[in-house]
Amino acid sequence: MLSEFGLRCIFFKRIRDKGLFWSYAPDITYDESKDNLLCETVLKYGDIDEIRVILEMYGESKVREVWERDVKSDARFKRLNYFIARVFFHLDVEASDFENLQHERLAKFRLLAG
């Protein structure tokens, strides 16, 4: 039986081989420092089964923490955020709840550009 680390390595490789880590080297490998990256990438670009896998591997609270910090405020993913909130986190939200959210990365870019 594989260890938790071994299972995460295999899953990480599967996500990498699908091309979901599009901005990273093709030979990127898993280590525990990449847990947040894996969760964020799967939430944004993975399918429903892959989201279920990260929820099982990391638990709802860890995945929700990553979602709230790194995905939720990204205006590019409004519909996805609504879906994730309702289906996976069982939140009583409306699509309009994801309008006009401040995107942290955009704010950082504006500070750097200014």
Image (cartoon, grey):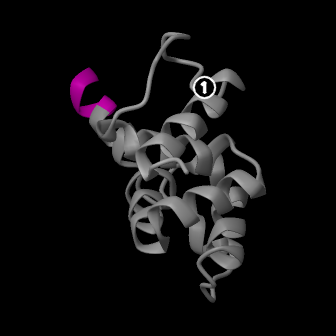
Q: Is residue 39 above or below residue 105?
A: below
Q: Quadrant of residue 69?
A: bottom left
Frontmost residue, 39 versus 97: 39
**Start and end of the magenta stretch?**
109-114
Frontmost residue, 101 versus 30: 30
Q: Is residue 38 above or below residue 20?
A: below
Asked if residue 77 lies left or right of residue 62, the reply is right
Is residue 17 visible to us here?
Answer: yes
Look at the image and tell me in which quarter the C terminus lies: top left
Q: How many marks?
A: 1
> Residue at point 52% right, 47% down?
2
Frontmost residue, 35 versus 110: 35
Asked if residue 25 lies left or right of residue 110, the reply is right
Q: Is residue 92 magenta?
A: no
Q: Is residue 88 above or below residue 74?
A: below
The amino acid at mark 1 is: Arg
> Residue at point 67% right, 22% down?
17
Is residue 114 visible to us here?
Answer: no
Asked if residue 31 lies left or right of residue 27, the reply is left
Q: Is residue 112 magenta?
A: yes
x, y percent for residue 48: 76, 57
Asked if residue 22 lies left or right of residue 87, the reply is left
x, y percent for residue 110: 31, 32
x, y percent for residue 27: 51, 11
> Residue at point 36% right, 39% down?
105
- Other-residue count near label 1 (Cα within 10 Å), few / some / many at <14 / 14–19 / ≥20: many
> Residue at point 71% right, 75% down?
87
Which element type, helix, strand or loop, lies under badge 1? helix
Secondary structure, magenta segment, majority class:
helix
Q: Quadrant of residue 18?
A: top right
Residue under circle 1? 16
